[in-house]
Image (tube, coloured by chain):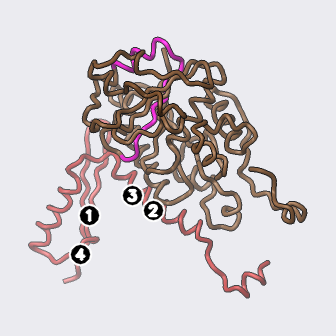
Amino acid sequence: MAKIIVVTSGKGGVGKTTSAAAIATGLALRGKKTVVIDFDVGLRNLDLIMGCERRVVYDLVNVIQGEAGLNQALIRDKRVDNLHILPASQTRDKDALTSEGVEKILDMLGKDFDYIICDSPAGIERGAQLAMYFADEAVVVTNPEVSSVRDSDRILGLLGSKTRRAERNQDPVKEHLLITRYNPSRVDDGDMLNLDDIQEILAIDLLGLIPESEAVLRASNQGIPVTHDAKSDAGQAYTDTVSRLLGEDVPLRFHEFQKKGLLSRMFGGGRR
Amino acid sequence: MKLLEFLRGERKKTASVAKERLQIIVAHQRSQRDQPDYMPMLERELLEVIRRYVKVDQDAINISLDRDEDCSVLELNVTLPRT
């Protein structure tokens, strides 16, 4: 039986899709059969971040409505063997998603895959609630910024009440905090919430910390999940995140401010 | 460093302001998390009724719902003005 993990946040633009793509890629690179599903019906973007936008023929809604088989809609990743993408519909409205339909698809995928990553849309409406409803674990993506932290707390409330596990009184959805766009230099200046503060406020365990990085934009420009950029700080941070998701104990990196030496200040730092 | 801060005119770090604000709003959000959907409406209407008889402010009323194992307690605190 596959493990279902929702990547969610409440607030938009914090890096949900980037994280879903990077985590799914990382899991597949570790040999896990992984599928990543875009739940953002009407505003799909996962296909772009994964670099398969021109290979989308059928989508999630087509499968739910019986217009295509699941295997016709699944896109095999070009770079990693064990990775598949199930895109969202661009034309339908979000009401086309039904709880029964989503459950059926997850059940079918569960037979073939080890991990099902659900990329949630922003907000707390139907799409977001369906993305989290069947989850076993949740990755709550949070920026060190007041509105993002507040929205993450709202999402935690929903995870504890509006999910199948909550409704059936099963073990609760396992909640993980993923802090993205962290800028240690601004934290050092006292102008950005530090990771201990965020963790203290949200009171869930820290899965990973992704520094603000030029590599993320480079990755999305090319449609190559940032995990593949193994030299970059963000790529390495996502690799660490995946290891922790697999239960490994990996020390935190990229959270401390490195004061630049005179030489690197004169000649510019290395490529980040 | 201290002297420098003094000369610059000491300024509270914005991150700690953010933390304080978040702690308050998140605590408030959590207290509402388990309450039924009708609570805000109930609160408003109760306030209306009380105001028909006594002049009280919006924040003079405090309503909370505590759940024990087999019963719930609706607690209503109204601070009445001195007459």
Q: Which residues are magenta?
A: A104-123
Q: Earlier in the sequence, mark 1 or mark 2?
A: 2
Q: Residues within 10 Å of mark 3 (few under 14, many from 20)?
A: few
Specify the quadrant of the image occupied by residue A232: top right
Q: Which chain is brown?
A: A
Q: Are marks 3 and 1 on the same chain?
A: yes
Q: Are marks 2 and 3 in contact (CB under 8 Å)?
A: yes
Percent x, y for residue A188?
Answer: 71, 63
Q: Residue type at mark 2? A: Ile
Residue A48 higher or lower than A266, as above or below: above
* Local SS, label 3: helix
In the picture of the structure, the residue carrying the numbered disc 1 is B77
Q: Residues within 10 Å of mark 2 (few under 14, many from 20)?
A: few
In the picture of the structure, the residue carrying the numbered disc 4 is B57
Report the mark closest to the observer, 3 or 4: 3
- Residue A69 located left or right of residue A115: left
* Marker disc for residue B28: 3
Q: CA distance from mark 4 to mark 1?
A: 12 Å
Q: Earlier in the sequence, mark 3 or mark 4?
A: 3
Residue A69 higher or lower than A197, as above or below: above
Asked if residue A111 is among those painted magenta in the image, a careful observer would answer yes
Q: Are marks 1 and 2 in contact (CB under 8 Å)?
A: no
Q: Residue type at mark 4? A: Asp
Q: Earlier in the sequence, mark 3 or mark 1?
A: 3
Q: Nearer the viewer, residue A24 or A146?
A: A24
Check the residue under mark 1 and report the chain it is in. B
